Amino acid sequence: MVNATRAGYELSHLSALEAESVHIIREVAATFERPVLLFSGGKDSAVMLELARRAFWPAPLPFPLLHIDTGHNFDEVIDFRDRTAARLGAQLLVGRVQDDIDAGRVVEKAGETRNRLQTATLLRSIREHRFDAVFGGARRDEEKARAKERVFSFRDEYGSWDPRAQRPEVWNLYNGRHAKGEHIRVFPLSNWTELDIWEYIDQAEVELPSLYYAHRRTVLERDGMLLAANRFLTLQPGETAYETTVRFRTVGDATCTGCVESEAANPAQVIAETAVTRLTERGATRADDRISESGMEDRKREGYF
């Protein structure tokens, strides 16, 4: 007699995560009028885009991509962003922080990164295109403020987030109710970890910008982090640039995104490194998260990703 339990179909860990994310993406496409997928060219958004592609294949993506461009991005990332959108035949929208600076909607302060300025550009882009659902690649393991997020994160008419105003999510049921002017941030990767992301990249052969893998680069040390020497950074007194082999665990504004010394040149080698690390990629390599103990939460309340 066949044991029904043993004969049952069981998904692997990665397949279960993939199925959950695909379900979330399809749910949004079915229930919202004007969704958009935030695509920065980073590893999480690349995985999210691959999941969206699989969710609707062989049909094209039913929503556009949106990148909030600080103007201080790594060249490799911008090239990858454009190539990927062209390869998929996806509509790519770009909200430029520089436009808001030029219009006087935000003020750039000398010596500060443009990361915080992205919020105004993101909210402006959402209003202009009347998006009612915005896919983001945030994961709960990245940072403690993001650990408070629901999969469907309600944002009010000002785009702000209140952790006490979020809705319960049980049995994979999501509440997307919102009034005109409000919207929902949707995080299909909420239950993924950095290790899950890399294992999926390896398994699904997801293409990434080259800077995610070990390469020789000129760097400088600042506040205990290695920053890539680039045209947006000015050497401060006492700093010296030197060349070493590094890779990036996350990518963002080139003025505040650090790298780590590494020889990991492919996904399998990155997985081996990630499996033994005790610091999240944001905690280890994002200077903008070190503003204060509640820096990320403060920005999220203002409408940040």
Image: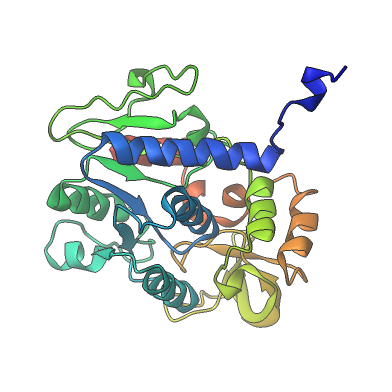
Query: Compared with residue 22, is residue 210 higher up or lower down, i.e. above or below?
Result: below
| Residue 134 relative to residue 274: left or right | left
Query: Compared with residue 99, is residue 6 higher up or lower down, i.e. above or below?
Result: above
Image x and y of residue 88, in percent: 40, 67
Q: Which residue lies furthest to the front in this view?
A: 1
Dividing the picture into quadrants, the one containing residue 217 is bottom right
Image x and y of residue 223, in percent: 59, 59
The answer to which of 289 and 170 lies nearer the viewer is 170
Q: What is the number of callouts on the image?
A: 0
Query: Compared with residue 141, is residue 275 higher up or lower down, i.e. above or below?
Result: below
Residue at point 38%, 71% (across, down): 72
The answer to which of 254 and 36 lies nearer the viewer is 36
Residue at point 14%, 35% (across, down): 181
Residue at point 29%, 62% (across, down): 109
- Let me know if residue 304 appears in the view: no
Residue at point 66%, 43% (across, down): 14
| Residue 203 relative to residue 111: left or right | right
The answer to which of 150 and 103 lies nearer the viewer is 150
Dividing the picture into quadrants, the one containing residue 59 is bottom left
Image x and y of residue 272, in percent: 80, 56
Q: Quadrant of the N terminus?
A: top right
The answer to which of 213 and 29 lies nearer the viewer is 29
| Residue 117 relative to residue 242: left or right | left
Query: What scheme was used to colour the molecule?
Result: rainbow
- Let me know if residue 292 appears in the view: yes
Q: In which quarter of the image is the C terminus?
A: top left
Image x and y of residue 135, in percent: 37, 45
Q: Residue furthest right?
A: 1
